[in-house]
Amino acid sequence: MIWNDSDTSTSLTKKFRFTTKDYYKLGEIGIFDGKPRVELLDGIIYYKHIGEPFRFSSADYYRMGDAGIFSGKQRVELINGEIIIMSPVNSPHASTVKTISRLLHKLLGENFLIGVQDPVDLFKDSDPEPDLSILKSRADNYYTAHPTPDDIVLLIEVADSTLQSDRKTKLPLYAEAGIEVVWIVNLQDQQVEVYQTPVAQRYKTINIYTKEDEIPTNLGITLAAASILIAPAS
């Protein structure tokens, strides 16, 4: 099945809320230096005279992490300059990620590197953490920097409760970054959605695979969808 998805305007995410202590800590470490004045309202930082949310850079984000702003709190990721809370991972989601990781390691060997819920550096204000990232091999295993779009061969998101936010928030970001192929392993509908040919903030072509199908890949292998869609029959 092939179809086009042109509706990429909806963002279904939950923003991280800062405490007053966090807010003053950000000032102490220089996050706001050289930028318009800001204020904290109901846990969200806004530009004071504009009324728009403050946008963090990747450099800001990692400085905040080093300063312990996120310690002991929910997992987060940086999307379009905003700190977004990541959904808790339930057991079907975790099991599917493990299954795909194990399968790809077995089939791909040393030809690629596989990241599991690791950051990828897409833009100066976006460092999402896809469930799996298949990367070009590199001698230092990306020790000195996170992978960028040129390093990424395939991104995979496993989606259950996150299905709409993956489609409406993550996919436009991946398309804009020029990621050639993205999969959404849709646990709700038990199908694999393969997105290809990025154009602006959308993918031109989407192929849908169910358990009976074989999935062609850009990795030099073909996968049985049933090896990924592992939910027991109801």
Image (cartoon, rainbow, N blue to C red):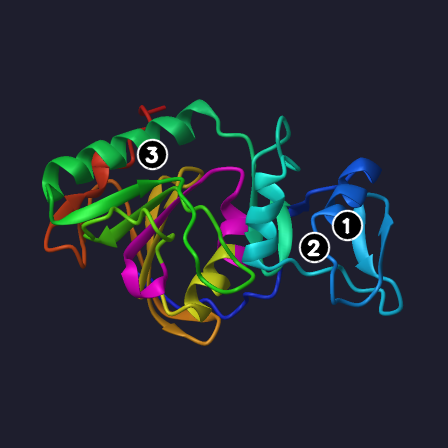
Going from N to C along the chain, the mark reached first, 1 or 3, is 1
Q: What is the CA distance from the residue labelled 1 to the residue labelled 3?
A: 38 Å
Span colored in magenta: 148-169
Is residue 161 in the magenta section?
Answer: yes
Name the residue at 26% across, 50% down: 134
Q: Amino acid at mark 1?
A: Gly
Name the residue at 28% across, 55% down: 154
Mark identifier at residue 97: 3
The foreground one among 6 and 2 is 6
Mark 2 is surrounded, within 10 Å at the Cα level, by few (under 14), some (14 to 19) or many (20 or more) other residues, namely some
Q: Give residue 26's position: percent from left, percent from top.
A: 73, 47
Mark identifier at residue 31: 2
> Is 220 situated left or right of 175 in this image?
left
Q: What is the CA distance from the residue labelled 2 to the residue labelled 3?
A: 35 Å
Of tags 1 and 3, the one toward the viewer is: 1
Q: Secondary structure at mark 1?
A: helix
Mark 1 is surrounded, within 10 Å at the Cα level, by few (under 14), some (14 to 19) or many (20 or more) other residues, namely few
The foreground one among 37 and 157 is 37
Instruction: Please give the residue where the numbered disc 1 appears in the rendered image.
Output: 27
Of tags 2 and 3, the one toward the viewer is: 2
The foreground one among 127 and 67 is 67
Examine the rendering and report whether any part of residue 176 can be seen: yes
Q: Give residue 102's position: percent from left, percent from top.
A: 21, 32
Residue 116 in which image quadrant:
top left
- Quarter holding the N terminus? bottom left
Q: Give residue 16's position: percent from left, percent from top.
A: 69, 43
Is residue 11 in the magenta section?
Answer: no
Q: Secondary structure at mark 2?
A: loop
Disc 2 and disc 1 in contact, CB within 8 angstroms: yes
Name the residue at 80% across, 68% down: 36
> Is 4 situated left or right of 32 in this image?
left
Mark identifier at residue 80: none
